[in-house]
Image: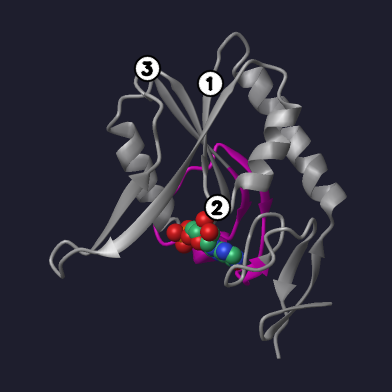
């Protein structure tokens, strides 16, 4: 059991299991994109560890870039606006594969996808290491998925609780008090 800030977390998935699954995803992507050079777009901060591990296991040429998203309440009429920050590469006519740590409600990815599709990539795919199907609030198609997990808060392997826990090599779940 570990403690981050005020909360306790217990082990959920071992690093070996996570990385075996990422290897499987990389093999599948390498087959599906044989003869192509996809542009991976990793969503910061959470996907850095997943992205690094996946990239090492690919057997095809590939490029990677990173983006952050910021969301803010614009006006009450337009609701939440999400901005893509840091994307320098041109996405036009590229085979884009977005790398995300976890799809929870799916609302973030819905907006990211909308904005990336507006830049006219030749194709779009989503790879997510984790997914909480019960938390989904909008339909999101995940082309490459690592693990479906319960609708509970998790940390480790890139995921944080208030800044802490990203460096843990295993995945941990919040312990119910
Ligand atoms: P969504 O828009 O609800 O799908 O949220 C996606 C983002 O919320 C992810 O990219 C994570 O950064 C964060 N997130 C969702 N669930 C968790 C969790 O269990 N632990 C840590 N971060 C999470």
- In percent of width and height, residue 133 lies at 56, 59
| Colour mapping used in the image | one colour
* Count of marks, rendered view: 3
Q: Vertically, is 155 above or below 66?
A: below
Element type where label 1 sits in the image = loop
Element type where label 3 sits in the image = loop
Element type where label 2 sits in the image = loop
Q: Which image quarter: residue 75?
A: bottom left
Frontmost residue, 17 versus 15: 15
Report if the CB atoms under discs 2 and 3 are less than 8 Å apart.
no
Label 3: few (<14), some (14–19) or many (≥20) C-alpha neighbours in 10 Å: few
Real-space Cα distance between discs 2 and 1? 21 Å
Give the quadrant of the C terminus. Answer: bottom right
Name the residue tied to disc 3: 93
- In percent of width and height, residue 20 lies at 82, 41
Counting residues from the start of the chain, the first of labels 2 and 1 encountered is: 1
Q: Is residue 104 visible?
A: no
Q: Is mark 2 within 8 Å of ligand 1?
A: yes
Counting residues from the start of the chain, the first of labels 3 and 1 encountered is: 1
- In percent of width and height, residue 124 lies at 44, 29
Residue at x 45%, y 55% (from the top left corner): 106
Image: magenta residue range: 128-154
> Does residue 134 show up magenta in the picture?
yes
Residue at x 75%, y 28% (from the top left corner): 57
Q: Is residue 138 left or right of residue 46?
A: left
Q: Is residue 72 visible?
A: yes
Real-space Cα distance between discs 3 and 1? 10 Å
Name the residue tied to disc 2: 45
Mark identifier at residue 38: 1
């Amino acid at each position: 059991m570990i403690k981050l800030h005020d909360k306790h977390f217990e082990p959920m998935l071992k690093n070996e299991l996570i990385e075996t699954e990422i290897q499987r995803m990389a093999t599948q992507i390498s087959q599906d994109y044989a003869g192509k050079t996809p542009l991976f777009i990793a969503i910061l901060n959470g996907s850095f560890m997943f992205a690094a591990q996946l990239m090492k296991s690919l057997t095809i040429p590939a490029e990677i870039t990173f983006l952050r998203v910021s969301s803010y309440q614009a006006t009450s009429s337009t609701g939440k606006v999400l901005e893509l920050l840091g994307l320098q590469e041109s996405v036009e006519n590229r085979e884009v594969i977005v790398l995300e740590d976890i799809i929870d409600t799916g609302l973030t990815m819905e907006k990211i996808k909308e904005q990336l599709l507006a830049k006219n990539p030749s194709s779009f795919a989503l790879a997510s290491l984790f997914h909480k199907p019960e938390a989904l609030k909008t339909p999101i198609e995940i082309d490459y998925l690592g693990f479906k997990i319960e609708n509970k808060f998790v940390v480790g392997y890139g995921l944080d609780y208030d800044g802490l826990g990203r460096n843990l090599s295993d995945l941990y779940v919040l312990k119910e008090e």
